[in-house]
Image (cartoon, grey):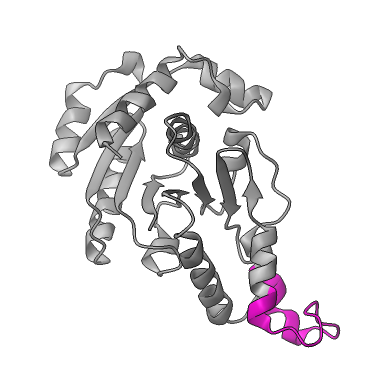
Amino acid sequence: MAHVIAVAGKGGVGKTTLCGMIVQYLCEQGKGPILAVDADANSNLNEVLGVKVETTLGDVREEIAQAEMAKESPIPTGMSKADYAELRFEDALIEDDDFDLLVMGRTQGKGCYCYVNGLLQAQLAKYQNNYPYFVVDNEAGMEHISRGVLPSMQTAILVSDCSRRGIQAVGRIARLIEECGMHPSVVGLIVNRAPKGELNAGIQEEIANQGLHLLGVVPQDETVYEYDCEGRPTASLPEDNPVKQAIRRIVDGLNL
């Protein structure tokens, strides 16, 4: 059974970059194969990891949910919708050397997707037996987990920038986790893009006010910005990069 690591935070705090580095470091530690799941509607985890996406699970959901209304269904005669869904979900699995990637994508059409989401839930449950770790890049609301589409998580990593509003946002996510009856073993905070890798007294006070457990601090680094601007995968940052080193220390501290 896979250990599910869910990474969440409000938009623009760098959680996808950190999520990709977590995947990379787990692979380097020989803990693969890892299933990376991009559950953010604004999906770009593949760019951090340096892989190309052809099909998302959202595309497959859309295709199957609309099949019955189409004049010519894409489902071959004699094949059940469930069998076709499994075949297409497997097509959406991007395979790399030490990790695989699934991009959830967004659903564009109207109508009920309950049946298709049920098929997706079953497929992901099957995948859970094939990987020691899932690493999930979530939207702030953690919708896919709260609705039961993804397996329940064991580790929740909440990412904030170095601002009071960011800390308050992840505080709300932490409370949502509790309200939804999730019971991860670890719920912890990473503060990203901290000047000189340090937190001032005001941010430390807000972390305490929100009752958050600080896992670590990741410094502001211009190299990450440059890689992003150049379209280079940030998972390929130099070994001595301070962001990469900070993430490694945090993961080591989790004792995964």
Residue 129 in sight in this render: yes
Viewer-side residue, 205 vs 213? 213
Q: Residue furthest right?
A: 72
In the image, residue 89 sits, relative to residue 206, either above or below, namely below
What residue is rendered at 59% in x and 18% in y?
226
What residue is rendered at 30% in x and 29% in y?
252
Viewer-side residue, 244 vs 87? 87
What residue is rendered at 73% in x and 86% in y?
68
- Quadrant of image for the C terminus: top left
What residue is rendered at 24% in x and 66% in y?
181
> Residue 122's spot in the image, x, y percent?
50, 72
Is residue 79 within the magenta segment?
yes
In the image, residue 111 sits, relative to residue 188, either above or below, namely below
> Residue 93's spot in the image, x, y percent?
63, 54
* Relative to 69, 167 lies left or right: left
Question: Total of numbered circles in the picture?
Answer: 0
> Residue 37's spot in the image, x, y percent?
51, 51
Residue 109 in sight in this render: no
* Relative to 199, 223 lies left or right: right
Viewer-side residue, 246 vs 105? 246
Which of the 4 quarters of the picture holds residue 163? Answer: top left
- Quadrant of image for the N terminus: bottom left
> Residue 100's spot in the image, x, y percent?
58, 47
Q: Which residues are magenta?
A: 61-84
